[in-house]
Amino acid sequence: MRTSLKTALKSVSAAAFLAAAASLPITAHAGLFSDDEARKAILDLRSQVDALQKDVANKSDKNSALSLSDQNDQLRQELARLRGQIEVLTNELSNTQQRQKDFYVDLDTRLAKLEPQKVNVDGKEVSVDVTEQKTYDAALNIFKSGDYKDAGTAFGDFLKRYPQSGYAPSAQYWLGNSLYLQRDFKGAIAALQTVIKNYPDNPKVADALLNIASCNTELKDKVAARKALETLIAKYPDSPAAQTGKERLAALK
């Protein structure tokens, strides 16, 4: 830019010199002009060159100042844009970190729910997973609703899926009751005898014996009913079922 400016100044100086020379008076003598006229012409030329140089310099300074001002404005705009992007990215990073934190908290919560839980079933602490618990609860709710056929099916399915479940004795017991309430007394006896055989220490065994006696009574088999009641009273004398069994045994005589 400085080289161009110098070139322009030289061009302006030359043009000014030629213009001044052209304006000088021409004589018919061998010399173009006298010493005084020459000095005056040179002074005039220098004045014109100085004026032109100042004008060019002023214009150059103004253009340079305007150019720098424009560049500063552009830089400020670019800086503002970059700051805006940084703020957006910072907020997005913060939001992403919070979403990740919430995700892992939610994941931990869900995993905790999926992990086997310790529950108390018939006085015994057992480990039960979420699906197992829901399946058993669903079958029990069906029974409570009075739909004994579907309840029997649900308890049967539960026992097939979870034969070693801590809820298996209860599921087997409620299966027997579902069959009893459908008046399938022989099926009920078979289901309840499984409770007695497979889970002899379970508290529901006493109730299973009482219900077997009821099934035999319905089948008009008093001998089998009496035998079930006598076994109940002998093995579980302190159970609530034994108290009821004594009353029924007295009624059979």
Image (cartoon, rainbow, N blue to C red):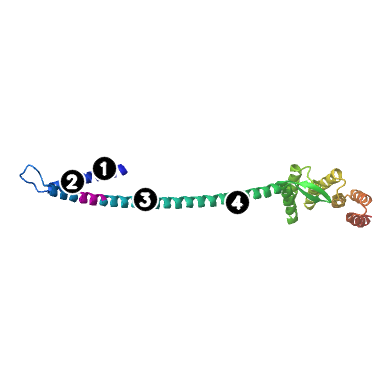
Amino acid type indicated by mark 4:
Gln
Vertical side of 241 occupied by 127: above or below:
above
Q: Residue 18 has which mark?
A: none
Whole-angstrom CA distance, mark 4 to mark 1, is 64 Å
Q: Which residue is mark 1?
A: 7
Q: Residue 98 has which mark?
A: 4
Amino acid type indicated by mark 2:
Phe
Q: Nearer the viewer, mark 3 or mark 1?
A: 1
Amino acid type indicated by mark 3:
Leu
Q: Position of residue 21 (x, y in %)?
A: 14, 46
Label located before the other in sequence (4 or 3) = 3
Q: Position of residue 7 (x, y in %)?
A: 26, 42
Label located before the other in sequence (4 or 2) = 2
Q: Residue 17 has which mark?
A: 2
Vertical side of 30 occupied by 220: above or below:
below
Confirm whether residue 1 shows in the render.
no
Label located before the other in sequence (2 or 3) = 2
Amino acid type indicated by mark 1:
Thr
Q: Nearer the viewer, mark 4 or mark 3?
A: 3
Q: Which residue is mark 3?
A: 68
Q: Which residues are magenta?
A: 46-53
